[in-house]
Image (cartoon, helix red, strand yellow):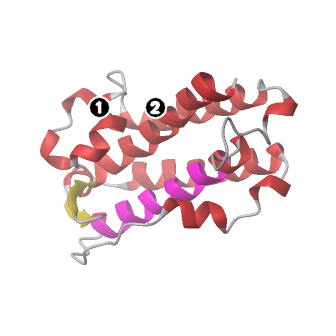
Amino acid sequence: MNSNQLPVNEYSKFNATYINALENVELFEELEISLHDFIKFVQNIPLDKFDYSYAEGKWTIKEIIQHIIDAERIFAYRALRISRNDKTPLPGFEENDYVDNTDAKSRSIQELLTEFSAVRHSNLLMFKSFSDEQLRRIGIASNHEVSVRALGFLIIGHMKHHQKVFIERYL
């Protein structure tokens, strides 16, 4: 399935920003391609920028990479639960609390990218394991309906959003 074929009733208006930013991409291909593109992009960032934040109280690049990893894990967990027909509404999460409780600043970029790669590879295999029926299943997360396949596109769109922020505000 391509991102432009995803019905708008399968994700919230808040998440539309991430999904609409994708250019007609196929879910499984883009989960893999965007992994490699992101790693290459990050490896080309000057070393002195990883601990930089563009304003007081803003996250550093390392903290944003950790945030991308944490958010992907949460989105994937939601996809797993919904794919297995779990009808339990899933709560939101406070991203600032997550970042405040990491030690991303003391981690190396290689360590963060290795973790990101492991998480993405695992999620790619999980999404490929879902049947078409499972990909279309809809559940509740953060008080909004969302499909399993929308969560896959959200993983990609969220990462690309932050990559764009790197370019616009950090580099």
Q: Is residue 80 left or right of residue 73?
A: left
Residue 99 is situated, as x and y percent measured from the top left of the image, at 62, 60
Q: Does the magenta stretch include residue 21?
A: no
Q: Nearer the viewer, residue 39 or 109?
A: 109
103 sits to left or right of 38: right
Residue range corresponding to the magenta coloring: 65-82
In which quadrant is the N terminus drawn? top left
Q: Name the element at disc 2.
A: helix
Q: What residue type is labelled 1?
A: Ser
- Tell me if residue 2 can be seen: no
**SS of the residue at dot 1?**
helix
Question: Contact (CB < 8 A) between labels 2 and 1?
Answer: yes
Q: How much space separates mark 2 and mark 1, taking CA atoms?
A: 10 Å
Residue found at the very far front of the displayed protein: 56
**Residue at figure coordinates x 62%, y 30% from the top left:** 166
Crowdedness of circle 2 by 10 Å Cα count: few (<14), some, many (20+)?
A: many
The residue pinned by badge 2 equals 30
Q: Residue at x 69, y 33 (%)?
A: 39
**Disc on the earlier residue, 2 or 1:** 1
Depth check: 129 or 49 in front? 49
Q: On the image, numbered disc 1 is attached to which residue?
A: 3
Q: Which of the 4 quarters of the picture holds residue 109?
A: top right
Nearest the camera: 162 or 3? 162
Q: What is the three-letter code of the residue carrying label 2?
A: Glu
Residue nearer the viewer, 169 or 105: 169
Q: Residue 56: percent from the left, percent from the top?
A: 67, 45
